[in-house]
Image: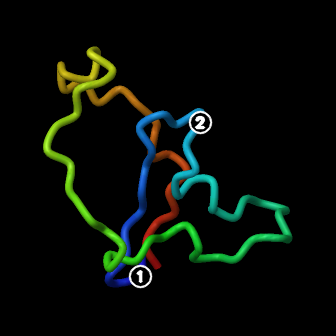
Amino acid sequence: MPAGHVFVMGDNRDHSADSTVHMCTEGQTDCVPGHEFVSDDLIVGKVLALVWPLSRWSGNDGTDAFAKVPDPK
């Protein structure tokens, strides 16, 4: 991940235009590598709590939400 940038995950992953939407996938020709990262200059707030879904309050880390996030270069 470039310095001064973040990878943003939406709270409704099936219907969010988060960083995963802007990732280049294998065979894709109309994307720009690096556009999945958001400049931290654009961050206007911070997460104070995750409250939904209720099942996530348990701290169970049984998700593959970050499986497609590329390793830092």
Q: Position of residue 18 (x, y in %)?
A: 52, 52
The crowd level at tag 1 (other Cα within 10 Å; few <14, some 14-19, many 20+) is few
Q: Is residue 9 left or right of residue 58?
A: right
Q: Residue furthest top?
A: 55
Type of amino acid under label 2: His
Foreground tag (2 vs 1)? 2
> What is the secondary structure assignment of the residue under circle 2?
helix
Tell me which label, 2 or 1, sits earlier in the chain: 1
Q: Is residue 56 left or right of residue 64?
A: left
Q: Is residue 57 left or right of residue 39?
A: left
> Residue drawn at (36%, 73%), measured in percent from left and top?
42
Type of amino acid under label 1: Pro
Q: Residue furthest left?
A: 48
When asked about the image quadrant of residue 16, the answer is top right
Q: Using the numbered discs, state the Cα–Cα distance from disc 2 to disc 1 in whole angstroms.
A: 26 Å
Q: Position of residue 28 (x, y in %)?
A: 82, 63
Q: Position of residue 38 (x, y in %)?
A: 44, 71
The crowd level at tag 2 (other Cα within 10 Å; few <14, some 14-19, many 20+) is few
> What is the secondary structure assignment of the residue under circle 1?
loop
When asked about the image quadrant of residue 3, the answer is bottom left
Against 1, residue 25 (above or below) is: above
Q: Which residue is mark 2?
A: 15
Q: Position of residue 30 (x, y in %)?
A: 83, 70
Q: Residue furthest front?
A: 44
State the residue in front, 48 or 55: 48
> Residue drawn at (72%, 59%), measured in percent from left and top?
25
Q: Which residue is mark 1?
A: 2
Against 17, residue 24 (above or below) is: below
